[in-house]
Amino acid sequence: MRLLYLDYCASAPIHPKVYEHYIKASKELYANPSSAHQLGFESNGIVEEAREDIASILEISPREVIFTSGATESNNLAIIGVARAARKSSTEKVHIITSVIEHSSVFNCCKYLEEEGFEITYVPVDMDGRVSVETIKNSIKSNTILVSIMHVNNETGTIQPIDEISKMIKGKGNIFFHVDGVQGFTKAAIDLSDIDLYTLSGHKIGAAKGVGVLIVKENIKLKPMIFGGGQEAGLRSGTTNVPGVISLAEAIKIGILEKNEKMEYIKKLNAFIVDGLKSIPGIVINSPGGEISSPHILNISSTEPGLNSAIILNLLSKKGIIASSQSACSSKSNKQSRILMEMTNDTLISSNSVRFSFNESVNREDAEYLLDSLEKIIIQVRKNGRFAVSI
């Protein structure tokens, strides 16, 4: 049976060139970069070179690059760190604005802060899953200290109006802007000049798992969440993941260099699949498409009652097709997509959704196989019932 992996949003394989750097660093740079001996100094020097490389590519200061274990930690540090620092210096109740369709590592952070006594506003989205800049503007209060909006939605691929939001916030006084850029980095254009905190993850872009970055502009005050030796400017204690950091720096270089060519290819692939889906009965496309959607993510739903996400994914897996229904962080606990419910208010659509995510290794033959498999699943379900499907 062939294997067709279409879950690159959850995790991507290490890029071959990145893998070479990662293995070499794992073998040779085993010393703790915080150790006060020659091997430690050498490891630390390599880490700092990687930090400078990343800063140069992103046109920021190396002091603004904070290495973490990944996106979840970066998002937690950004939101909780800013909130706690602001509470210490404020006499008012601290207010944060986010959206109803954020990744769980942002959304659940905000739910936790509500329990801690912080005031949170969750702005709605339209049917395309987009926030309104005007709604965010109207939600700002005298005690607002942070706005956190993702760049590209991890389930639908919807691109948020980040540039417009950042420019609006800059005219509103001492409010910080955090962007979860995990699904947007190397996929959609981004200008970091008016963004105060920015999250990216290694294993989404061809680096190793267990490493990420939180970009923290120099004027931002954060309270750390992990205490110990004071690594990463005191914001993230713990032994630095040297091979992971090296892999991340290399993946960022490659991702930026190859971005335009790869995304142009994926855009054409997406268009071919979307065109094919339109001829399959019982399929609804949830991703908005066009300029407000990143083509590496395509979200669909079945309108067949009872043919929920779990059943569709199981039937696809029997054909060797690996996909998901939500983010990997949410799929095990939720049967219904919170994101699609906010977009559509439709229980059937939200319960019967599947997310396909692509990279440049997916070819035309793969796309045809996916379309053929989906069509057979729908036909068989309509003919025999969902529990009698034989693929």
Image (spheres, helix red, strand yellow):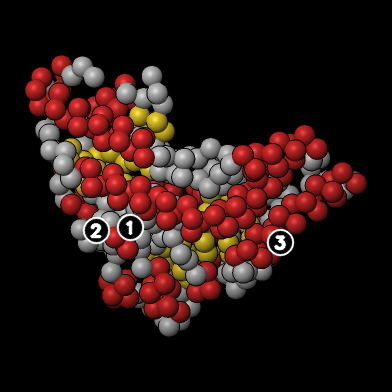
Which quadrant holds residue 148?
Answer: bottom left
The 10 Å Cα crowd at callout 3, few under 14, some 14 to 19, many 20 or more, is many
Taking depth in this image into account, of 39 and 8 the one nearest to the observer is: 8
- Residue located 63% across and 63% down the image: 57
Helix, strand or loop at label 1? It is loop
Q: Amino acid at mark 3?
A: Glu
* Pointer 2 residue: 128
Residue type marked 1: Ser
Is residue 241 shown left or right of residue 258? Answer: right
Is residue 230 visible to us here?
no
Label 2 crowding class (10 Å Cα cut-off): few <14, some 14-19, many 20+?
A: some
Residue 309 x %, y %: 25, 33
The residue beneath circle 1 is 293
Say which quarter of the image contains residue 163. Answer: bottom left
Q: What is the distance, in whole Å, between disc 3 and disc 2 at their CAs?
A: 38 Å
Residue 1, percent from left and from top: 38, 19
Q: Amino acid at mark 2?
A: Asp
Residue depicted at x 66% and y 69%: 61
**Front tag of 1 and 3:** 1
Quick one: label 3 or label 2, which is nearer the N terminus? 3
The label on residue 159 is none
Given the current orientation, which residue lies at the most extreme left position?
Answer: 383
In screen coordinates, is 233 left or right of 379? right
Residue 52, numbered label = 3
77 and 387: which is toward the camera: 387
Q: Residue 23, relative to residue 76: is it above or below?
A: above
Q: For the residues labelled 1 and 2, say whether their Cβ atoms are less than 8 Å apart.
A: yes
- Nearer-N-terminus badge (1/3): 3
Query: Label 1 to label 2, Cα distance in Å?
Result: 9 Å
For image coordinates 16% across by 30% down, the residue present is: 378
Residue 196 in the image: state x and y as whole percent.
Answer: 52, 69
Name the spot of residue 124 as percent of width and height, x first: 25, 61
